Image: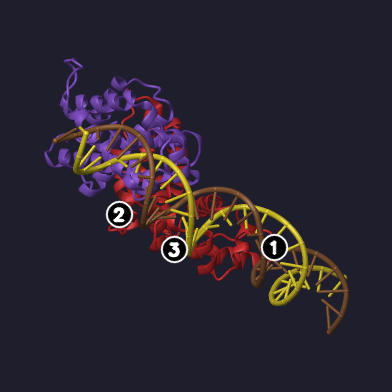
Chain colours: A red, B purple, C yellow, D brown
Amino acid sequence: MSQDKPRTDPRILRTRQLLKDAFVDLLQEMDIEKISVNKIAERATINRVTFYLHYRDIPDMLEKMADEMIEDIQLAVNREPAHPNQTEDEDELAMLSLLEHIAEHAKFFKVVLASRRTPIFTERLLRMLSETVRQRLESGRPSFVNTAGVQKDIAVWYSSAALIGTIVSWVRNDMPYSPRFLAQQFSLLRTHNQ
Amino acid sequence: MSQDKPRTDPRILRTRQLLKDAFVDLLQEMDIEKISVNKIAERATINRVTFYLHYRDIPDMLEKMADEMIEDIQLAVNREPAHPNQTEDEDELAMLSLLEHIAEHAKFFKVVLASRRTPIFTERLLRMLSETVRQRLESGRPSFVNTAGVQKDIAVWYSSAALIGTIVSWVRNDMPYSPRFLAQQFSLLRTHNQ
DNA sequence: TAATTATCTAACACCTTGTAAATTAAGTCT
DNA sequence: AGACTTAATTTACAAGGTGTTAGATAATTA
């Protein structure tokens, strides 16, 4: 998905892309415990030894992929518009960008979010959303829940888990609603509850 | 944690308990990818071959442990009272029972919920809570969010993910609030938002 | 005590991991 | 284009994990 910034040897980019694609491929077919460096290398048509030139082991590879996922999301969300619709406020537009980004890379997200046993990706998304929710709460903007009498910590846990959990369920169920509709539903949840 | 119902050879109970304790023990010390049948057996002072007499492999062991976790929770939640407090309604009492059960077995839940990479347990809890939330929604009782205009599916995803996510964060942060306080906070979230 | 059943021991073939050294291939730079 | 640099490949190795077998030993049950 993401491209390295400074001129990088194309062989490196090619190899990493092949390895990552092979991993996503395999994850569609089997549980992560059954995936070995052997299988990844074989599927990527890359020598097994080469894998170790790029990643320490499979968990290390997952972490780097999760980093890239977050980077790409930040880019997509900050890139903003491209979806003119005067009824949507700033927050709804950000959520729309996020959901559309996920929908565009459905194959990837379906695999890493829907597969049980790859919680790293969900963890990272949760962390990212917690930060957003916490900022919103501190800025006094309407939160996703009524915060009157509710401890701030708990409100943040509650709202961010609700968001990520809904998104994961949405992806797992093959995105039965459009990104725009889901973003609007989130806005409803946000504005009705204050 | 849980005991088998029909008279079972005490050697079986002993072996399984030793294996499960060893596993929880190891999970406190290392990531799950580093845990092998070898290590579990060694820590449990059980022969490695014996492990295979009880479980097909480690994922199978995890599944059985998750089943038992859910069984134990159902028992604890249905056992109800033991916490008289007239201000609490039925739902709040059920939540209180759940949180107290988790607090009682903090060592276990801390390990299986807080450890990244053991999502089976979280998955099972989510499934359980989704069922509860869906029933509540269909019975017309107040949900955890304002459901006016919100698709039922989405409301269920949202509320159940919020609950399980909050509980996981609560456990990961070493339960900084009492079960009763957290149960009350959930009630606030529930009653304020309708 | 005898019969049953669980656990242990030893051994097996096979797969996976992580690393090393030497060779080949591809990309970069002037 | 040719020299230089760096990536990928090949081959090899030791250590450890997996899942299964068959027979011996120990604990439980009736």
* Kind of residue indicated by mark 1: Arg
Counting residues from the start of the chain, the first of labels 3 and 1 encountered is: 1
Q: Residue at x 16, y 15 (%)?
A: B86
* Circle 2 Cα neighbour tier, 10 Å, few/some/many (<14 / 14–19 / ≥20): few
- Toward which corner of the image does residue A174 lie, by quadrant? bottom left
According to the picture, the residue beneath numbered tag 3 turns out to be: A26
Dot 3: chain letter: A
According to the picture, the residue beneath numbered tag 1 turns out to be: A7
- A150 shown above or below B157: above
Q: Is residue A105 visible?
A: no
Counting residues from the start of the chain, the first of labels 2 and 3 encountered is: 3
- B190 shown above or below A20: above
Q: Secondary structure at mark 2?
A: helix
Point out residue B9 in the picture as x, y percentages from the top left corner: 24, 35
- Whether labels 2 and 3 belong to a single chain: the reply is yes
Q: CA distance from mark 3 to mark 1?
A: 30 Å
Q: CA distance from mark 1 to mark 2?
A: 40 Å
Dot 1: chain letter: A
Q: Secondary structure at mark 1?
A: loop
Counting residues from the start of the chain, the first of labels 1 and 2 encountered is: 1
- Number of marks: 3
Q: Is residue B180 visible?
A: yes
| Of B148 and B152, the residue lying toward us | B152
Whether pointer 1 and pointer 2 mark residues with C-beta atoms closer than 8 Å, the reply is: no
| Horizontal side, residue A38 vs residue D24: left or right | right
Residue that lies at the very extreme toward the left in this rendered image: B139
Point out residue A167 in the picture as x, y percentages from the top left corner: 35, 49
* Kind of residue indicated by mark 3: Leu
Q: CA distance from mark 2 to mark 3?
A: 32 Å
| Horizontal side, residue A61 vs residue A87: left or right | right
According to the picture, the residue beneath numbered tag 2 turns out to be: A181
Whether pointer 3 and pointer 1 mark residues with C-beta atoms closer than 8 Å, the reply is: no
